[in-house]
Amino acid sequence: MVGRNRVAGSGHVPAKAPMTTPDPEPPIRPRFLDAGEAALVVEFGAAVDPATNDRVLALDAALAADPPPGLAETVPTYRSLMIHYDPLTLSRAALVAAVEGRLAERAAERAAARGGGRHWTIPCCYDPALAEDIEEAAALVGLAGADAAARHAEGVYRVYMYGFAPGFAYLGGLPEALALPRRPSPRPPHPPGAVMIGGGLAAIGTVPMPTGWYVVGRTPERLFAPEREPAFLIESGDTLRFEPVSAEAFAALERRAAAGEVVAGRAA
């Protein structure tokens, strides 16, 4: 028979079409949103993920390396970059054009300009005397306190941004086993260096305040120290792990940190 492939019993196997890898989808075109008369938000998407955050940080670095006249400050978040500017010096149209020019640069060049990407080891004490909510949070996800601490210490976390208070670091990468909603109402002020979980995320809080997060550990490290240069120890785009330490080791490290020593480890 002509025009048909004979397979069974013929010994003839039709040639397969060469396998191709589909082209990656182009990144979502950013939206430009006004925030008053002197700020512009460049929004890169709706999802909170490393790829979107990389685009935010790459633009932030490109503007820092070559800022247009009139740019005052940039504020990176999970998925957007807020740009404060002087409208008497820099028009909105000129700012948008400057941003689009930076976005047109090659991704590799933007990544190189951003730098960062350091990896930190943050000491963390999970002793219930310091990890004030570890037992409560563990019970909510069906784990013993020690098991919840172990799961938390296994995670590799990405620093997405600072926000809410000086040195309050929002972290992605919380193990799924520890995902739980934030509290229905705030608890009393957390201690300095609180390591917290809630809403599927992790966080480190530096300034004591009421919180809807669960305090599952404490670190002696100071992410924010205004007398230090730089005042903020870790940067958006860095990654970190928590190294469990005893209550005794925590006390010793806290004294060293109070004297100005950086007690976190950083990969070269």
Image (cartoon, grey):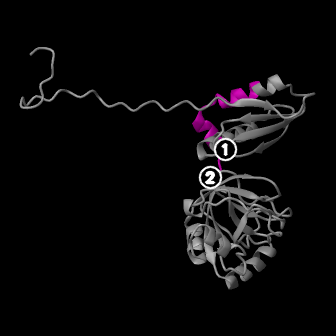
Nearer to me, 213 or 195: 213
- Give how far apart the Cα atoms at labels 1 and 2 are: 9 Å
Seen as rendered, the residue at the extreme right is 88
| Element marked by disc 2 | loop
Q: Position of residue 239 (x, y in %)?
A: 62, 57
Q: Is residue 164 above or below residue 37?
A: below
Q: Which residue sits at x=15%, y=15%?
A: 3
| Residue marked by disc 1 | 114
View extreme (front): residue: 184
- Viewport quadrant of the N terminus: top left
**Does 125 appear in magenta?**
no
The amino acid pointed to by label 1 is Arg
Q: Quadrant of residue 66?
A: top right
Whole-percent x and y of residue 245?
A: 64, 78
Q: Is residue 103 magenta?
A: yes
Q: Does the CB distance between marks 1 and 2 fall below 8 Å?
A: yes
In the rendered view, would you say 84 is above or below 97? below
Q: Is residue 37 above or below residue 215?
A: above
Locate residue 95 relative to residue 124 in the image: left or right. right
Magenta-tinted stretch: 97-116
Q: State the SS at label 1.
A: helix
Which quadrant holds the C terminus?
Answer: bottom right
Q: Residue at x 10, y 28 (%)?
A: 12
Magenta: main secondary structure equals helix
Q: Residues within 10 Å of mark 2 (few under 14, many from 20)?
A: some
Q: Residue at x 72, y 40 (%)?
A: 80
